[in-house]
Amino acid sequence: MTARSLIAAAVATFALSAGAAHAAETPTVVIVHGAFADGSDWSRVIPYLQAKGIKVTAVQNSLDSLEGDVAAAQRAITNAPGRVVLVGHSWGGTVITQAGNDPKVAALVYVAAFAPDAGQSTADQGKQYPVPEGIKHLQADAAGYLSLSADGVASYFAQDLPRSRTDVMAATQGPIAAKAFGEKVTAAAWSTRPNWYIVSSNDRMIQPELERDYAKKLNAKTTTLPSSHVPQQSHPDEVAKVIIEAVEAVAAK
C-alpha cells in the first residue's frame, strides 16, 4: 500500500469513528404522557424524531401514583444509551420534575405541563387561577380514578381534533388515581437543567396563563401554539421541532 493509500485509509477510518461518536452522543428522547392518555398520545410526534435518527421511548404510565410513574420513567432513563432529553405532557410534567433529577437527564421539555416546585404536588398548582372548564367535567369511579367522557375529551381535552380521533382517545385513555395529584415532588429537576416549554394558548385543562407563568419560572425557551391541551396531536410537527431543538442543544455540548 502506498503512502497516499495509507493516508486515505486513515482519514476514512477517522471519519467513520467521528461519525459513530457523534451518533453515540445524540441523546435519547424519553416521553412521559399525561393523565387521560397513554403512550400512543405521542404517535404523531415520534415519526418526526425517528426521521432525524433520534431514539425515542414513550413511557407507559400506570397512573396509579406519582411514585409509580416516576419509577416507570426511571426505568426508561436507565435503559437509554447515553444522555436523555426528558419530555412530559400535563401530569407528565410533574413526573419529569421528579424523575429528571437522574444524572443522565440533560434537558427537560414541558408540553402544556405542570412544573411544581420541590415540596409541591400537582393539586397545589394553579389555585390562584380560575378552574379550567375541563376539570369541571372529570368523572370519578368507585375506586377513585378520574377520567373524561367522550364528550369531555372532544370538548375540553382535544377540541381542535376531529370527533373520529377524540373518540379513539377517549376509548384508550388512562384514568388516573385522584390521590396521585396530592403526592409531592421532593426535588425540582428544572432548577438545575435547561428547559423548553410549549404553551397551549387554547388549553381547557390547564390555564394557559399558568403555563406561561411556568415557562417564566423555569426560564424556559418558550413556544406558544394555538392548541388545545394536546398540541402533540394537533401540531405534531411544531412540537417535534421543539424537542429536536432540545436534542441538538444537548448534543452540541
Image (cartoon, grey):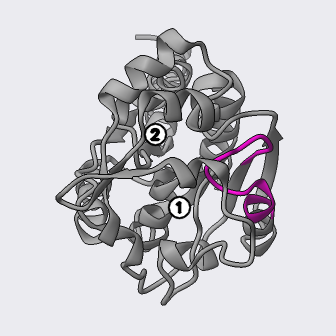
Q: Residues within 10 Å of mark 2 (few under 14, many from 20)?
A: few
Q: Is residue 154 magenta?
A: no
Tell me which numbered mark, 2 or 1, is placed earlier along the sequence: 2
Residue underneath mark 2:
21
Looking at the picture, which amino acid does disc 1 mark?
Ala
Q: Nearer the viewer, residue 28 or 99?
A: 99
| Closer to the eye: label 2 or 1 | 1
Quarter of the picture containing the N terminus is top left
- The image quarter containing residue 224 is top right
Q: Is residue 200 magenta?
A: yes
Taking the spot 50% from the left edge, 28% from the top edge, the residue there is: 151
Taking the spot 51% from the left edge, 86% from the top edge, the residue there is: 118
Does 66 sit left or right of 32 as displayed?
left
Taking the spot 77% from the left edge, 40% from the top edge, the residue there is: 202
Disc 2 on helix, strand or loop? helix
Quarter of the picture containing the C terminus is bottom right
Does 235 sit left or right of 185 as displayed?
right
Taking the spot 47% from the left edge, 34% from the top edge, the residue there is: 23
Disc 1 on helix, strand or loop? strand
x, y percent for residue 195: 67, 61
Q: Which residues are magenta?
A: 199-212
Q: Nearer the viewer, residue 66 or 79?
A: 66
Residue 117 against residue 215 in the figure, above or below? below
CA gap, disc 2 and disc 1: 18 Å
Residue underneath mark 1:
106
Does 12 sit left or right of 178 as displayed?
right
x, y percent for residue 109: 60, 52
Q: Residues within 10 Å of mark 1 (few under 14, many from 20)?
A: many
Q: Is residue 172 visible?
A: yes
